[in-house]
Image (tube, rainbow, N blue to C red):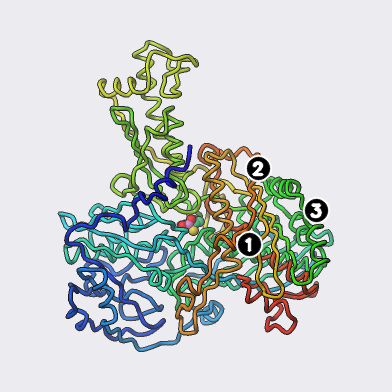
Amino acid sequence: MNHLDPARHVRGESQYLDDILVQQGTLYAAVVESPVAHGKLLNIDFEAALQLPGVVRVLTAQDIPGENQIGGIVPDEPLLAEGHVHFRGQPVALVLAETEHQAHAALGHVRVEVSPLPIITDPRVAAAQNELIVPPRTFQIGDTQAAWAQCAHVFEGVAESGGQEHLYIETQGAYAFPTEMGGVRMVSSTQGPTAVQRHTARVLGIGMHQVEVDVTRLGGGFGGKEDQATTWGALAALGAFVVRRPVKLVLDRMADMRMTGKRHPYSSDFKIGLDKNLKLVAYEATFYQNAGAAADLSPAVLERTLFHATNSYFVPNVTATAYSCRTNLPPNTAFRGFGGPQGMFVIESALTCAAEQLGVPVAELQRRNLLREGDVLPYRQPTEGCHAEQAWDTTASLYNLPSLRAEVEAFNAQNKQFKKGLSVMPICFGISFTKTPMNQARALVHIYTDGSVGVSTGAVEMGQGVNTKIMQVAARTLGISPERVKVESTNTTRVANTSPSAASATADLNGKATEMACLALRERLLRLAATDLQMDYEGLTIEGEQVLAAGTPADTTWEKLVSAAYWQRVSLTENAHYATPGIHFDAQTNQGHPFAYHVYGTALTTVTVDCLRGTYTFDAVQIAHDFGQSLHPQIDRGQIEGGLVQGLGWMTLEELVFNDEGRLLSNSLNSYKIPDLYSAPKVIDVHFLDTPGHPNAIMRSKAVGEPPLMYGIGAYFAVRDAIRSFRPGASLPFSAPITPEKVLLSLYPDALLTPACASTTVT
Ligand code: LUZ
Ligand code: MOS
């Protein structure tokens, strides 16, 4: 079975928010932004804007009937600025006009008066001033202080990783319609329809039952629409609610880049200790997360950094501390990996630092310290079904790591201008929302009297193929053709109180609920068949739309059975609720069993660096990945390829630049470079490891959304490896992205870069 959507996408038939036929009377909204990154809001003068043709209304915080608050984890974020502004691009007012052009033309005629206050953009500066979003968190196991004494080698350093623009192809937006009874219905480009519903109700001062949110599909989310679709949904709804006309709000690309939060940049300190056999003894890390101006999801992202601070390695003594630092940038948010990649980059830097100082290949340190079955992670969950070594060893043998290394060395010995580099990047990623209560989902399944099936869940299709997987689950479980199944839009009135489509867990959670609902329907239908046919229920199945008794066709089909059920007044609808079993976590002790399971894999990256230009080409990335029993190898392979390239972009090309005034300089695709066909690896090999999957994974097909992003970290270390071939022994900082500009600076000795890692005296 193919992925459902691509054919429709390339024909332009897929319905996105902007494809909805515009309803008569629709007003267009445009957002007035704060012109400065921090200040006291003195006045908003929109009289001139109101005089312009087509402008109907300008809304400010004063027009909000309910609570001016959209903060989730911490209530610290107004929908429209009130009293102060905290970042450049913060929504201050909403212009409503008859046409989109008129709404945008009016923006320049709204005067926002602000008396400026000092601006912080650096997380370490924020931490020094105690500008923290939440108190710091520490994950700890063993005793690092005592452990340093047992180490033969100890190294310390600093690692920096940059932010990342989500660059979903479809920008943020919503289209809201007033309904009778004073409510609103809207279509929102969101990963979290319930979050949009909840915050809209709060802002409008009405019940959640008066707000309906519907999502057909997104043109990408990547975490950027997990929490931050709320602003645009609530603003459109506010307009529709106040003016009683439909309101459409879609950000243009540059507004989206300016106003929305991104992946969190991190600045981190590390200290790593090994014994004389190069086994890891102790690891300390301190993470300074640049949260931006409001909490958004930052505390949860911070927590996942700690969960993944030791990546795929076993370390008996760990102290990892993380600070969520308030700065005057747009609030940073979820982005594929959710803080995990930032944590993993630091331990990979620490291992590379140790290997370089010791003069051993980093791969040797990595391999020697991989997680094994039953190893306990710093948060006390033991590994179960650990495939870290299997993934590494399969990659090394399948793609012939030793001979590849020899080829790279031979190439480098013969070439001066071009140098090749190599890296191995293992990953271990925990599957589940780390906030245990979020790991629940529901499915509503209708069988219609003609035998066709409609499935509603909380899953949002955003290109990842979740609707295809849900269709597979329903068809397989009911024993019918997938053509009979329709996966409906995600709608808060059909399936309520949903978790966002996030954390790689969407197919697992919603697929399991779908499976449960379909199993209940199947049992109900087969019990009916048993009675009608006077046969034993045990041994009855449905396969290929035919009822089978002990494997041989009985005298009824799917269609007949469904029809019989209707006429005998048996319900053809089922609603199922799934909650991941066996997970728990205590956020006071930072201990528990937060993850349903872990996903493993290893990537081998080869790069060629042009040492005259600083540019590079990725020759190949070769991966062995733990899919379990993949439900859909085509979709899953696509997730690996896409995740890898997105991670590679974060680590190499994509450089967000804010100036000291908190203004985004990399504010368009002229100045923000993402991987294209030419910068993607020439070869991407994906090997499906032979692993059993996990009972908590949907049909033993493991979650696949986020883990592959972290293969991209290998790109950074491959480039670094090539640089060190050109400049043997060079001590280079750990600073991502390693853009061509930085590569060039690193290649020549008087570069203005300070080394960021050194050996420490052993006590
Ligand atoms: N969102 C969230 C996530 O709310 N909690 C998580 O643990 C998570 N993990 C990954 C991506 N989004
Ligand atoms: Mo996400 S970072 O799973 O929305």
Give left or right: position of 377 versus 4: right
- CB of mark 3 near ligand 1 (< 8 Å): no
- Please give the residue where the numbered disc 1 appears in the rendered image: 713
Looking at the picture, how far across and down is residue 97, in whole percent? 21, 70
Q: Tell me which amino acid carries mark 2.
A: Leu
Q: Earlier in the sequence, mark 1 or mark 2?
A: 2
Q: Is residue 538 left or right of residue 431?
A: left
Which mark is in front, 2 or 3? Answer: 3
Farthest-out residue, top: 534
Number of marks in the rendered image: 3
Residue 533 percent across, percent down from the top left = 37, 12
What residue sits 73% from the left and 71% below the top? 723
Residue where numbered disc 2 is placed: 689
Residue contact between numbered discs 2 and 3, judged by CB atoms under 8 Å? no
Mark 3 = which residue? 402
Q: Secondary structure at mark 1?
A: helix
Residue drawn 66% across the image and 45% down it: 386
Mark in the foreground, 3 or 1: 3
| Residue nearer the viewer, 378 or 235 | 235
User: Image height check: is 574 above or below 662?
Assistant: above
- Disc 3 residue type? Pro
